[in-house]
């Protein structure tokens, strides 16, 4: 029996196969079981452990000993929803002509639809001594356990990389009382992620928490005796280190797709409904690059929101009810104790407007391309962030003049536009 994906009945034996049981893969399986309760699904993941929520791994899981892992789904869910789960099994290749998946253990499985949700993999620099005990690249909960193992009894911790992972990890370890040093090769933190004013605020917050921040600095060597003892900077400066967390960015995991000759370019290229260049093969989450109608370019986003919404989009397409992906992107991070929330993507932004109270470190930055709003970044202003998301979801955006008239005007504007939208339905 296979799934008749339009009639919601089962009449052949070929399941929907999902490669990757992270947030995107699990959300796809969840949405498909809700939309088509009879569908047969098989999840495959190279990790032998049960999938868990990853955002806390660089935040509360490191700062609080009492924090426990939260599974994305309990084992009983797989049984109750007829979802097969092959843990610790790696997909070696797949054949789009015969619609088969081949595993590294020699087994083969035929699919009706194939969902690629491999996510991204860390980008690790080549530095002498990086292979010593106490050096951890944060990928999954086992890596987070290793950080706990090395960092909790330690005094000196070093974080390499000033992006989301680096800043969050430095924040968490400083809260736990470690003497933390953060090293960033670029001129500022959150270089490709946040506005300069927000990056500067995050740096101040980290330094107030006791974190030493080095900018425009590279790590040249990790010294030790099989276990890390010291690090050496490109300036020649050296200081103690008992644990080193590497957070130097990530790249989409496209190796499997490239091996199957799917179209890839910094991600697996998909249509607005998550279809790849191969028949009956879809890609979702961090590894997918999709055309954005709003921004007029292709985007690849790495966030829980994107994992969830691309998964839902793929389910709709498989059900025969395709809807182009138009979800409003949003992100958040705990950076130096500041809650930074971002809505939209500052693509093509050439001017910005700051509103709020920078002195109290509560403000938002509105990014415009000409007079078109493209993104809003907020620091400890949850209401502004939520209102921005509502505007983006409504697909009607305030102008620079609207923003300058203040939050009360923006709230009234949204309510008026929302009423107009409801009347048109």
Image: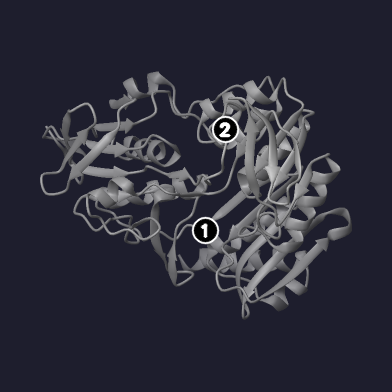
Q: Earlier in the sequence, mark 1 or mark 2?
A: 2
Q: Residues within 10 Å of mark 2 (few under 14, many from 20)?
A: many
The reply to whether residue 7 is in sight is no
Instruction: Name the residue: 63% across, 68% down.
Output: 416
Instruction: Name the residue: 27% across, 35% down.
Output: 91
Q: Is residue 274 depicted above or below 293 in this figure? A: above
Quarter the C terminus occupies:
bottom left
Q: Secondary structure at mark 1?
A: loop
Q: Residues within 10 Å of mark 1 (few under 14, many from 20)?
A: many
Q: Is residue 418 depicted above or below 174 in this figure? A: below
Report x, y in % for residue 217: 70, 53
Instruction: Name the residue: 63% across, 21% down.
Output: 149
Residue in front for this viewpoint, 250 or 413: 250
Q: Which residue is mark 1?
A: 328
Residue in front for this viewpoint, 284 or 189: 189
Q: Secondary structure at mark 2?
A: strand
Q: Is residue 313 left or right of residue 388?
A: left
Instruction: Name the residue: 65% across, 69% down.
Output: 367
Residue in front for this viewpoint, 235 or 282: 235
The reply to whether residue 271 is in sight is yes
Report x, y in % for residue 260: 22, 49
Which mark, residue 225? none
Q: Nearer the viewer's eye, disc 1 or disc 2?
A: 2
Which mark, residue 136? 2
Q: How is the image coloured?
A: one colour
């Amino acid at each position: 029996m296979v799934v008749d994906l339009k009639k919601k009945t089962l009449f052949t034996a070929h399941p929907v196969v999902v490669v990757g049981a992270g947030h995107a893969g699990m959300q796809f399986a969840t949405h498909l079981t809700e939309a088509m309760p009879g569908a047969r699904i098989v999840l495959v993941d190279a990790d032998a452990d049960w999938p868990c929520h990853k955002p806390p791994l660089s935040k509360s899981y490191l700062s609080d000993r009492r924090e426990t892992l939260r599974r994305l789904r309990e084992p009983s869910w797989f049984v109750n929803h007829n979802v097969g789960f092959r843990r610790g099994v790696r997909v070696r290749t797949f054949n789009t002509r015969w619609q088969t998946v081949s595993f590294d253990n020699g087994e083969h499985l035929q699919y009706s639809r194939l969902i690629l949700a491999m996510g991204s993999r860390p980008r690790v620099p080549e530095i002498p001594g990086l292979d010593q005990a106490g050096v951890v690249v944060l990928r999954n909960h086992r890596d987070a356990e290793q950080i706990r193992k090395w960092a909790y009894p330690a005094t000196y911790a070093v974080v390499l990389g000033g992006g989301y992972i680096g800043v969050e990890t430095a924040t968490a370890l400083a809260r736990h009382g470690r003497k933390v040093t953060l090293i960033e090769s670029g001129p500022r933190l959150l270089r490709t992620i946040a506005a300069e004013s927000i990056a500067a605020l995050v740096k101040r917050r980290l330094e107030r928490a006791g974190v030493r921040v080095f900018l425009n600095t590279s790590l040249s060597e990790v010294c030790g005796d099989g276990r890390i003892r010291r690090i050496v900077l490109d300036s020649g400066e050296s200081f103690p280190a008992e644990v080193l967390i590497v957070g130097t960015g990530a790249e989409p995991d496209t190796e499997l797709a490239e091996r199957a000759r799917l179209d890839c370019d910094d991600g697996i290229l998909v249509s607005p409904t998550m279809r790849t260049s191969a028949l009956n093969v879809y890609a979702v989450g961090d590894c997918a690059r999709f055309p954005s109608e709003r921004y007029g370019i292709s985007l690849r986003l790495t966030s829980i929101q994107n994992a969830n919404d691309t998964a839902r989009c793929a389910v709709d397409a498989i059900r025969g009810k395709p809807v182009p992906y138009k979800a409003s992107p949003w992100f958040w991070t705990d950076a130096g104790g500041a809650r930074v929330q971002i809505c939209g993507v500052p693509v093509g932004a050439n001017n910005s407007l700051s509103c709020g109270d920078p002195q109290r470190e509560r403000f938002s930055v509105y990014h415009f391309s000409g007079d078109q709003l493209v993104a809003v970044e907020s620091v400890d202003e949850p209401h502004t962030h939520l209102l921005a998301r509502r505007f983006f979801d409504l697909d009607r955006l305030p102008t620079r003049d609207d923003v300058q008239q203040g939050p009360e005007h923006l709230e009234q504007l949204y309510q008026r536009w929302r009423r107009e939208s409801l009347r048109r339905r």
